[in-house]
Every structure is written in C-alpha cells, then in structure tokens.
Image (spheres, rainbow, N blue to C red):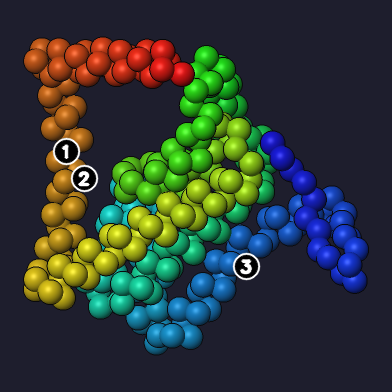
C-alpha cells in the first residue's frame, strides 16, 4: 500500500503534514466532498426536489441499485441527465478517495478486514502465475467500473485496484474515467430515447429492473439443469484454452 503523507507546496518548499493531521484529512475530505454535493443540490433546487435527488443518491448505495437504475430514475423524475450523471460521478469519486486513503483502516475492521486480506492474498498468488496480465491492469479496472453490473462500483473497484497492486493515483484515474464514461453513456442513452423516440423514462427503468432481476434468476435456474451445467463446463474449458493460447503468445 502506498500510504504517503499529504503535502502542499508553499513558497516553493514541500511541507509535510503530521501523521495525525494527515489521517484526519484523509478521513474528512471524502465527507466534505459529499457535503459540497449536498450543498450544491440544495442551492440549485427547492427543498422537496433536492430531497428527491438526495434520496436517489442514497439509494445508489443499496443493492441492487446502481448507475443503470439511479440515472434513469433521476431522468424520469425530471432531472437533467447532466446533473444526475455528474452527481453519481461525484459520489464515486468521494467513495474512491475514502477507500484508497483509508484502506489500511478498513482492513482492520473485524470480518470485513479478514475477507479483504484473504482476497488480496488470493489475488497476489493468481497474479504471480499470470504475469502477462500486468499490462492490462489499468484498462481492466476502468472497464470493470465502466460496465454497469452488480458489484462493479467505485468501492469494489478500489478494492480490486489494491488487489492488483495499482498505485492510488492509477486506481483513482481508472475509477473516475470508468464512472464518468459509464454514467454519461447511460444518461445520454436514456435522454435520447426519451427525447427523440418519445420512450417514457419510467418504461426504460422498468425494463432495466426486469433485466436485473430476471437474468440472474434465469441463469441460476439454467445452471441447475443438466444442460445448463454442461454449457457452463464448455464455457469454462473454452476460457482455459484461450488463457493458455494467450500465454503461449507471450
């Protein structure tokens, strides 16, 4: 972990903060960013409208909600897609900073810390035997955050970045880029369907929720059948063959 003290340039010289002040800054800045977002929301809208947007952003932390549901819901409520998208990206940035700046504290949380340390050890062992993946770490993490799937947000992205051994700046850049591209792709797509094709945003949200709920249930049910289990084995075998071929090319 690259835990370096924060510093600032004053009169051409680098002044390092003390460890205590450094820790306080690392803990408070993400919350200050979240507070700044709340302040801007209440400045832009009346109390009722601001509470609606704030409630959506709180739901963003509750599975199975994610960009793919929160952004269409915000557009359906009448918020400009730019506002809801930037709000989601801002939340992702705050969460990412909290994770990468305080990762060692999170690892000391009972049960959760043990799980994270276990994943890090497993990841290190896997990556030691797959060195060819090193060149793809940053792109892979960006794509991980970009695809709007369950468990692919800024928090899990930050943890995976640590498992991959990426620097904090690389994790922050990957999460920010992935979140920005994903949010605005979803937001503009919903806006375009609503504006140019006259598709009600609530219908789009209902369709997304149906896919989120139906597809996992269907895939689980298919896996439990004999045919589904065979298909799963075929896919796994094909994947392992592909990995071996890539290794040979390296």
Residue on which the image places disc 3: 32
Crowding at mark 3 (Cα within 10 Å: few <14, some 14-19, many 20+): few
Rounded to the nearest angstrom, the CA distance separating label 2 from label 1 is 6 Å
Residue 196 versus residue 130 in the image, above or below: below
Image coords of residue 239 (percent x, y):
29, 18
**Tags 2 and 1 touching, CB below 8 Å:** yes
Residue sitting at x 84%, y 50%: 19
Rounded to the nearest angstrom, the CA distance separating label 3 from label 1 is 38 Å
Residue on which the image places disc 2: 212
Asked whether 195 or 67 is in front, the reply is 195
Query: Helix, strand, or loop for circle 1?
Result: helix
Residue on which the image places disc 1: 215
Query: Helix, strand, or loop for circle 3?
Result: helix
Residue sitting at x 39%, y 43%: 143
Query: Helix, strand, or loop for circle 2?
Result: helix
Residue 159 in view here: no
Image coords of residue 124 (percent x, y):
57, 22
């Amino acid at each position: 972990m690259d835990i370096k003290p924060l510093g600032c340039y004053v009169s051409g010289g680098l002044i390092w903060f003390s460890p205590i002040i450094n820790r306080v800054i690392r803990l408070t800045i993400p919350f200050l960013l979240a507070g700044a977002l709340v302040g801007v929301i209440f400045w832009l809208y009346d109390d009722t409208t601001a509470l609606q947007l704030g409630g959506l952003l709180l739901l963003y932390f509750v599975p199975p909600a994610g960009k793919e549901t929160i952004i269409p819901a915000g557009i359906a409520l009448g918020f400009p897609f730019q506002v809801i998208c930037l709000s989601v990206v801002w939340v992702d940035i705050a969460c990412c900073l909290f994770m990468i700046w305080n990762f060692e504290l999170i690892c000391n949380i009972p049960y959760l810390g043990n799980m994270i340390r276990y994943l890090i050890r497993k990841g290190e062992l896997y990556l030691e035997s797959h060195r060819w993946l090193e060149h793809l770490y940053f792109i892979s993490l960006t794509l991980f955050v970009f695809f709007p799937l369950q468990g692919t947000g800024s928090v899990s992205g930050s943890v995976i970045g640590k498992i991959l051994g990426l620097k904090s700046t690389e994790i922050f850049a990957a999460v920010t880029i992935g979140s920005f591209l994903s949010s605005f792709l979803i937001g503009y797509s919903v806006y375009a369907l609503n504006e140019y094709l006259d598709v009600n945003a609530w219908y789009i949200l209902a369709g997304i929720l149906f896919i989120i709920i139906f597809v996992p249930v269907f895939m689980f049910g298919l896996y439990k059948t004999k045919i589904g289990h065979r298909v799963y084995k075929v896919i796994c075998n094909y994947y392992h063959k592909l990995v071996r071929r890539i290794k040979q090319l390296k």
